[in-house]
Image (cartoon, rainbow, N blue to C red):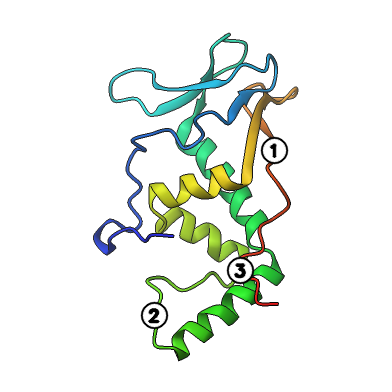
Amino acid sequence: MTAVPEEQAGKRPEAREPLLDQCAVCGLCGEPCRYAHTAPGEPARYYCRSDCQPAVPAAELEARVGRAVMERLCTPAGLARMAAAEQLLRRLGHELPEPVPRSAAHAVRQWDLVLDEASRRSAVRESLLSVALSPSRDRPEAVRLFYAWRRPPVRLFDLE
């Protein structure tokens, strides 16, 4: 994973390419969701081409999906293996640009503040087949997400 330059850390620019391109789908009709700026100066949104549900702000949706991806990838066992690998690399004289996450919450913070767009996209594409957006029955403005994962969680830095 590549780190964002220090002066840009904590500042998430608008994505140049949609993070969920080809994996966000409408949970009502099954159509792929499109990414677009609805009006100049307005935040980007994902919307159903069939217009069967309200558009979802892109930043909100991408943050929710990023949290789910990082929580799935950063299991306690995987985090322990990453910490062991980090210690081994340090003993060999290699310093990582960012520390490995110590918890799923730490991994989510790194997603939000440190990981660049390419790293986020890679994590999503490697782990997520699709995410279906479905409005809540009780609150149509709220969107429930249903995930179709590509495979079981990746065992990062498996040293066994």
Report how far apart the C-alphas of labels 3 and 2 lie in the structure. 20 Å
Q: Which residue is mark 2?
A: 95
Nearer the observer, disc 3 or disc 2? 2
Vertical relation: 137 (above or below) 129? above
Which residue of the protein is positioned furthest toward the front in this rendering?
160
Q: Is residue 154 above or below residue 54?
A: below
Among numbered discs 1 and 2, the one appearing first in the sequence: 2
Q: Amino acid at mark 1?
A: Tyr
Mark 3: secondary structure: loop
Residue under the image location 38 percent in, 59 percent down? 2
Residue under the image location 70 percent in, 69 percent down:
76
x and y percentages locating residue 68 in the rendered image: 63, 48
- Pick the front one: 12 or 16: 16
Residue 143 seen in the current view: no
Name the kind of residue labelled 2 in the image.
Glu
Q: Are marks 1 and 3 in contact (CB under 8 Å)?
A: no
Spatial CA distance of label 1 from label 3 is 22 Å
Query: Mark 1, residues whose alpha carbon is within 10 Å: few (<14), some, or many (≥20)?
Result: some
Helix, strand or loop status at disc 2:
loop
- Quadrant location of the C terminus in the rendered image: bottom right
Q: In the structure shown, which secondary structural element does the residue marked by tag 1 occupy?
A: strand
Which residue lies under the disc numbered 1?
147
| Residue 4 point in image, percent of width and height | 33, 58
The amino acid pointed to by label 3 is: Ser
Is residue 44 shown above or below 19?
above
Q: Which numbered circle lies on residue 70?
A: none
Picture quadrant where residue 114 is located: bottom left
